[in-house]
Image (cartoon, rainbow, N blue to C red):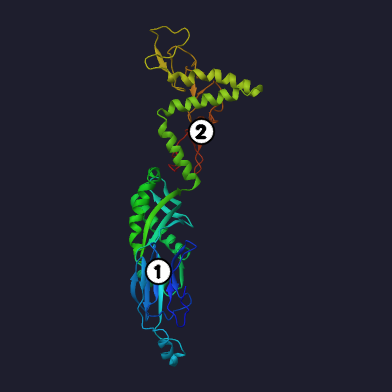
Amino acid sequence: MGVDNVFLLEALEWFDESGKALLHRLPEQGSGEIKFGAQLTVRESQAAVLFYKGKACDAYGPGRHTLKTGNIPILTKLLSAPWGMISPLRAEVFFVNLKVFTDLKWGTRDPVAFRDAELGLVRLRAHGVFNIRVVQPVLLINTLAGTMGRYTTEQVEDYLRQVIVSRFNDYLGEHLHTLFDLPGRFDDIAEGLQQRLAQDFARFGLALDGLYVTSITPPEEVQQAIDDRSRMSVIKDMDKFVRMKAAMAMEKAAASGGEAGAGLGLGLGMMMPAMFANLQPSGNPPATGGTGAGEAMVRCPDCGMMIPANARFCPFCGHQQLLNQQCENCGKNLTPGAKFCPRCGHSTEEHTKEMICPHCHSTNLPKAAFCNQCGEKM
């Protein structure tokens, strides 16, 4: 590259073979004695900054440029004898890559906390890509690269990723109400986040050329809740849907064969009328054998179906209509002499037991709250 010439003029240029270098300095090792009249060639995708005597003197765009320094060929070398034949007029050129650096990754290393209005505190993971480009070469050199001879996207990517994640968490907290509103909003989130990050990137001489959100992932249990919510919004009549799914499950089990399948098939046949009675069109009450058109109808207290008023048992669930004795715990009809409820197992004799006062040992009526003799609480 012609930066080590002792007596001849330099010809300075730079090619980025890696595609990841933001800037490159010539000479690569420290500063040099770039001479008056040195030729600088800058490509269309580059910019160059001349540092002379420790300061940024000028910036150069595409083309060929003649550099002006105080280093005169041969003469400067002779005059630099007091400094060990090294000229004190130090100069270096920084080449800055102005192309767009694409496919830089960002994402949450650890889940970030999001306060969902419906689900509460949820920890999210998010990932995406972003593109950057240099818009202020001198600012980039002074704030990020400093005196480094080479600065790449790999050196700045980790820091920019942390900035994006921090702003992402703030943006979600301010603009997203609940994760149920998340589908279809990735573009809006990316656009708003890019505007929020513009100032953070500009302070380093960089521009965020594009930011994209590829995924926002809640925990597995939250994903399940979102899927269930979506499925429920599709179902118009949940009662009919539950009845249909129950019937399909019993039909599948009955078709599996064997004694268990036969028993389930029998149960299916007995329960199908009750399950689908409410699915009949309104205005057409379920038909019951031997029921006249003008016969009075009542509602079964157990299954809720309309049955003849004089029926002794519900034809749908078998519930006894003639009331003899009911369980005081669940209301189930009891057969005469039953000691326990067949539905909930509650003892039928507890309500007939007399209570003994623990203080005066006198006998009180069943379920008495206070003793009739001493007045103490039972």
Q: Quadrant of residue 83?
A: bottom left
Depth check: 137 or 77 in front? 77
> In the drawing, does residue 136 fall left or right of residue 288?
left
Instruction: Give the residue at x 43% y 34%.
Output: 232
The residue to which callout 1 is attached is 41
Residue 43: percent from left, percent from top:
40, 64
- Precedes in sequence: disc 1 or disc 2: 1
Q: Please state which amino acid type lies under the numbered disc 1.
A: Thr
Residue extending furthest right? 258
Q: Quadrant of residue 299?
A: top left
Compared with 26, 300 (above or below) is above
**Label 1, residues with CA under 10 Å away: few <14, some 14-19, many ≥20:** some
Residue 84: percent from left, percent from top:
47, 90
Q: Please state which amino acid type lies under the numbered disc 2.
A: Glu
> In the drawing, does residue 342 fall left or right of residue 39?
right
**Label 2, residues with CA under 10 Å away: few <14, some 14-19, many ≥20:** few
- Circle 2 sits in a helix, a strand or a loop, which is it? loop
| Whether label 1 touches label 2, CB < 8 Å | no
The residue to which callout 2 is attached is 354
Depth check: 232 or 86 in front? 86
Judged by depth in the image, the label closer to the viewer, 1 or 2, is 1
Depth check: 372 or 120 in front? 120
Residue 346: percent from left, percent from top:
53, 31
Depth check: 233 or 370 in front? 233
> In the drawing, does residue 96 fall left or right of residue 271?
left
